[in-house]
Image (tube, rainbow, N blue to C red):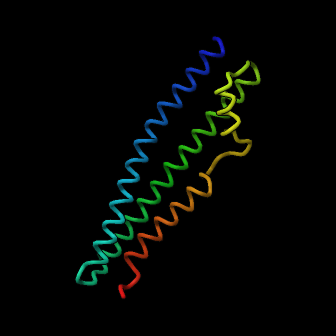
Amino acid sequence: MDAQMLEMQGLSVFGTYSIAFALRSIGSILAIWLALRIANNIRNAEDDNIVAKILGTGFGVLTVMFAYYWQTAYWSLRANTANNFKEMGESMELSAGVQQFVNNFASAEPVTAPGMIVILFDLIVLAMILVTIWVPKK
């Protein structure tokens, strides 16, 4: 099979997975929005309901955990795809676009977590949820 066909197959599979991860990202964004709304409703409630606070905290923590899981899965998929293209490049010439993909995303180390910016984002979202629920109103 020629190099161009292999590249197209690899990019097609990567694109299909990317669409699935984009849909999961939208779901994560909606779940984060819902967790922030729940936290805000708990904060604005007239009574101090500890059960609601615990359940809201659990939902917020799980929401951020699932978001982090899908972010990690996507970063791993992208690195593994780039590493596979890099291996292909050892036996055949890659197109300029695929070579740029390899240059940007191939990793000599196993990818087990997304970049620091994603981790920081998740921690900020989690802090927003927890502070909204647990810090007393003034």
Residue 19, image x, y percentages: 44, 36
Q: Is residue 103 left or right of residue 36?
A: right
Residue at image x 56%, y 26%? 11
Residue 66 sits in quarter: bottom left
Residue at image x 39%, y 47%? 26
- In this rendering, the answer to whether 69 lies above or below 83 is below
Residue at image x 28%, y 72%? 41
- In this rendering, the answer to whether 24 lies above or below 83 is below
Residue that extends furthest to the right in the rendered view of this protein: 90
- In this rendering, the answer to whether 71 lies above or below 14 is below
Residue that extends furthest to the left in the rendered view of this protein: 46
Residue 132 sits in quarter: bottom left
Q: Nearer the viewer, residue 11 or 72?
A: 11
Q: Quadrant of the C terminus?
A: bottom left
Q: Nearer the viewer, residue 5 or 51?
A: 5
Residue 77, image x, y percentages: 57, 39
Residue 133, image x, y percentages: 37, 76
Residue 136, image x, y percentages: 38, 85
Residue that extends furthest to the top in the rendered view of this protein: 1
Q: Quadrant of the N terminus?
A: top right
Q: Nearer the viewer, residue 86 or 98?
A: 98
